[in-house]
Image (cartoon, rainbow, N blue to C red):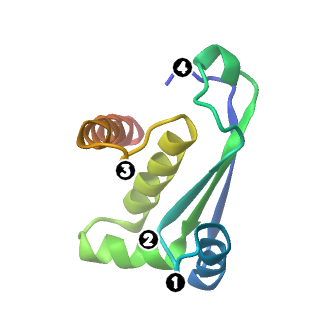
């Protein structure tokens, strides 16, 4: 993605902690699958990210397991999907702004998932 030295933190947690984060930061009840907390409000360019902490990705292991069973994929694959989704949010992708942006994010997600196998 052009950010060879970018840093992020990853937390894989349970539904209880994820629900608490979801309520505290988004005023939503219950757990969600992934939350991304960017360290910067503006969309960053690759040269600005080098060696920089770009944010945190929090994944609910419980939700990931349920989704992997529903989608009939391995848990590892689902965890990679969610991690990629969170990272894309950290670097400026957003699926909620328009259908075009959602498609752009989906295509990048597939591309990255194929890279990790």
Asked if labels 1 and 2 touch by Cβ distance under 8 angstroms, the answer is: no
- Distance of label 2 from label 1 (alpha carbons): 14 Å
Residue 30, which numbered label?
1
User: From the viewer's perspective, is the residue at label 1 or at label 3 nearer?
Assistant: 3
Q: Which residue is mark 2?
A: 64
Does label 2 or label 1 sit earlier along the sequence?
Answer: 1
User: From the viewer's perspective, is the residue at label 2 or at label 1 nearer?
Assistant: 1
Q: Quadrant of the C terminus?
A: top left
Task: State the residue at coordinates (34%, 35%).
Answer: 108
Task: State the residue at coordinates (32%, 37%).
Answer: 101
User: From the viewer's perspective, is the residue at label 2 or at label 3 nearer?
Assistant: 3
Does label 1 or label 4 sit earlier along the sequence?
Answer: 4
Q: Residues within 10 Å of mark 4 (few under 14, many from 20)?
A: few
Residue 61 in picture, x, y percent from top left: 53, 73
Q: Which residue is mark 4?
A: 2
Asked if labels 4 and 1 touch by Cβ distance under 8 angstroms, the answer is: no
Q: Which residue is mark 3?
A: 96
Task: State the residue at coordinates (50%, 52%).
Answer: 83
- The foreground one among 75 and 103 is 103
- Distance of label 3 from label 4 (alpha carbons): 24 Å
Mark 2, secondary structure of its residue: helix
- Distance of label 1 from label 4 (alpha carbons): 35 Å
């Amino acid at each position: 993605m052009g950010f060879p030295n970018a840093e992020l933190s990853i937390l894989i947690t349970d539904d209880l902690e994820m629900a608490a984060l979801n309520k505290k930061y988004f005023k939503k009840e219950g757990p969600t699958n992934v939350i991304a907390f960017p360290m910067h409000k503006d969309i960053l360019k690759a040269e600005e990210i080098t060696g920089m902490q770009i944010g945190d990705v929090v994944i609910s292991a419980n939700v990931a397991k349920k989704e992997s069973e529903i989608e009939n994929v391995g848990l590892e694959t689902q965890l990679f999907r969610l991690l990629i989704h969170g990272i894309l949010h950290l670097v400026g992708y957003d699926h909620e702004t328009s259908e075009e942006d959602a498609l752009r994010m989906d295509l990048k997600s597939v591309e990255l998932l194929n890279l990790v196998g």
